[in-house]
Image: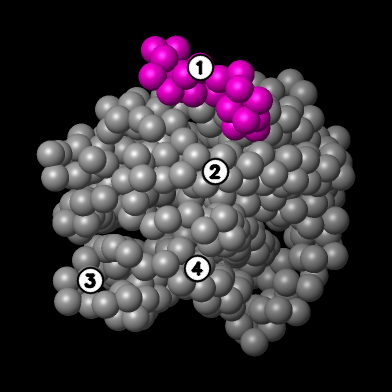
Amino acid sequence: MGVPALLVGVVTVIALFFDAFTDPIMGQISDNYRSEKWGRRHKFMLWSIIPTAIALALLFAPPATLGTTGLFIWMLFFALIVRLGLTIYGVPYYALSAELSTAYNERTSITAFRELFNNLFNMILFILAFVVFLPETPEFEDGMMNRAGYAPLVATLAIIGVIGAVIATYGTRHKVADLRRYTDDSRTGWRETFSQLALAANIKSFVWLCGGYGLTLILYGAGSALSLYMGVYLWQLTQEGKLLLSLAPFISLIPAVILATVLAAKMDKKPAAIFFGFVYLICSLLPYLGYRLGLMPALDAPSLLPILAIASAIGFSALTGIIIITSSMLADVADEMELRTSKRQEGILSASYSFAQKMTFAMGTLIASVALAVIKFPKQAEPSLVPQSKINGLADVSIIVAIFFGLGAIFCFMKYDLTRKRHAEIQTALR
């Protein structure tokens, strides 16, 4: 729509500070809510669904008469509403992971199924975008430049989101935890939110878990923000090529879910997370390093797309493994926190984790926005008009981000210390 990348980054930062307060407050409210009918989580999930969908659809449908300032204000307002809605739904939703099961390995299976469906619907997004709403036309050399296609695309996705969220809410309602287990669990008000966060910050396993996951998401966020630029300008793919590259990761989805579940059971969760971290780093780095060293095939070579697709599929498989295993780790950390504080606080931990997720993904997006501004990459330019030096800058940014944040994530995972044996001891003590 022509909004400068730096202003998009400003919206990201403002939304980040907004999330810094709403996520933990929602976690605290959810932890302390009691309803015989809805438990602690489900009512908030249900309330948020329709308003979030409406705000999401409007975010991508600004009036055509708005200039840059108007678009900035529109984006900021509806981005904040969407983030608030996702907080009200998402914090209780993710907190359910620890409540649905206390079994060490079964928690990994639960998060694995969640990621399976999450990514299946992501696949639908790419198909709708590249095939239905944003195809190449004689008017647009690249279909993603078609501003008119975004509003109907996102409205369709919002409807799908409503259906999925309602199914998730009512489909897990029968699993509402027996509230009698919280009879002796003293409640705290939302004003005590940040004192409860301080308690979570004293749990080293939680800190290193958030660090490793967060740095992974910075890498993922920056890569996602730059991926459209890479497909258009660096690799110069057609819409069909971009669709195939976007769908390639989903070929590895089911193997990734199985592999994450098996490795976490066989190796334990920490070494499995480290393994997936290394694989994700390598796949995020090699294509762009190969490009700068002149080792990649020519842009018109038939072998280029398969190579990119293989790297994308393997990297996505590793990222999926990280998400599954770290989500399972978080449920274990909730048990450790209960042992220390005598309170079940899945909500506050989930909120902290959700905030780390949003913050770091947003930071990745911001890093990409700032990098585009630093290298002075032209906006809304057709691929044939962009200088090669600017395209090389895109590859250089990707290399630097992969090395720095990929290695940082692996280091944090290595410091995580909540093992299977330690978790068994915690479960025994809680009984």
Please report whichever mark, 3 or 1, sits nearer to the chain's N-terminal start.
3
Observer-side mark, 2 or 4, equals 2
Quadrant into which the N terminus falls:
bottom left
Q: Which residue is mark 1?
A: 297
Protein image colouring:
one colour
Mark 1 in CB contact with mark 2 (< 8 angstroms): no
Q: Is residue 34 above or below residue 240?
A: below
Q: Which residue is mark 4?
A: 6
Q: What SS does tag 2 mark? A: helix
Question: Which one is in front, 409 or 289?
Answer: 289
Q: What SS does tag 1 mark? A: loop
The amino acid marked with disc number 3 is Pro
Measured in 3D between alpha carbons, the distance from the residue under mark 3 to the one under mark 2, in whole angstroms, is: 34 Å
- Taking the spot 67% from the left edge, 46% from the top edge, the residue there is 401
Question: Which one is in front, 418 or 383?
Answer: 383
Measured in 3D between alpha carbons, the distance from the residue under mark 4 to the one under mark 1, in whole angstroms, is: 33 Å
Measured in 3D between alpha carbons, the distance from the residue under mark 2 to the one under mark 4, in whole angstroms, is: 20 Å
Q: Which residue is mark 2?
A: 389
The amino acid marked with disc number 4 is Leu
- Taking the spot 32% from the left edge, 64% from the top edge, the residue there is 2
The amino acid marked with disc number 1 is Pro
